[in-house]
Amino acid sequence: MNRADRIRWDRKYSEKVPPGEISPDPFLAASLPGMAKGRALDLACGFGDNAIVMARAGFEVTAVDISSVALERAKGRALKAGVHVDFVLSDVEDFDFGERVYDLISGFYFLNRSVFPKVKRGLRPGGIFLYKTYTLDELHYRPALNRRYLLEKGELKGFFDDSEILLYEEKDNGAECTAKIVARKQGNGPMKDY
């Protein structure tokens, strides 16, 4: 685990206050209904909102983050919500998928391109990858962002060209510029059609 990254993220999460209510990303919340339950992995989970909502929906959830501060708060929030989530302290890049495969892998607002091949191997046949993060166009709103952590036009779709793309969208909603994808690994899957 990169010590400098861990310290930086611990500091950021120490300064942030988690929302009072569990508030998952709307894209995730809209995607869960109708999805067959199974094993889920939430990458870079932060305060755990998405992981908690997946657990509420009936998934067996593992959630990974580099920040021990974020995970401690996420554990408390999951306990208060009455759900179990297996929280793992790890840099997403270093997370060992091992032999486990997942029906659903999600990630929101982080980008580490080296993780995408692991995600593809970590999905069971028919498994779903649900992901959203910023594109280079986000620089119009926040010019100080590091370009390294922003997707180029069409880049996300290209990473999953060997998967069935159920939904792909790049959008500027007037406040942020994102790309999002729902990709299904070849085989029968747990996701409704889009």
Image (spheres, grey):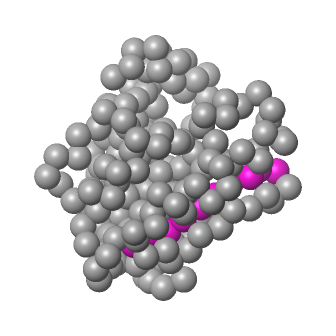
Tell me residue 181's x, y (percent).
54, 65
Q: Is residue 55 visible?
A: no
Tell me which residue sits at (68%, 55%) in the image: 153
Q: Is residue 135 above or below residue 36?
A: above
Q: Quadrant of the N terminus?
A: top left
Q: Is residue 12 above or below residue 168?
A: above
Tell me which residue sits at (38%, 37%) in the image: 92
Tell me residue 76's x, y (percent).
40, 38
- Helix, strand or loop: magenta stretch: strand
Q: Is residue 47 magenta?
A: no
Q: Quadrant of the C terminus?
A: bottom right
| Quarter of image, res 19 | top right
Tell me which residue sits at (76%, 27%) in the image: 144
**Numbered circles on residues, count:** 0
Magenta-drawn segment: 175-184
| Left or right placement of residue 75 versus residue 141 in this view | left
| Quarter of image, res 30 | bottom right
Q: Is residue 189 visible?
A: yes
Tell me residue 193's x, y (percent).
48, 85
| Left or right placement of residue 101 versus residue 143 in this view | left
Q: Is residue 179 magenta?
A: yes
| Left or right placement of residue 145 versus residue 60 in this view | right
- Of 10 and 52, nearer the camera is 10
Q: Is residue 51 above or below residue 54?
A: above
Tell me which residue sits at (58%, 45%) in the image: 109
- Of 46 and 168, nearer the camera is 168
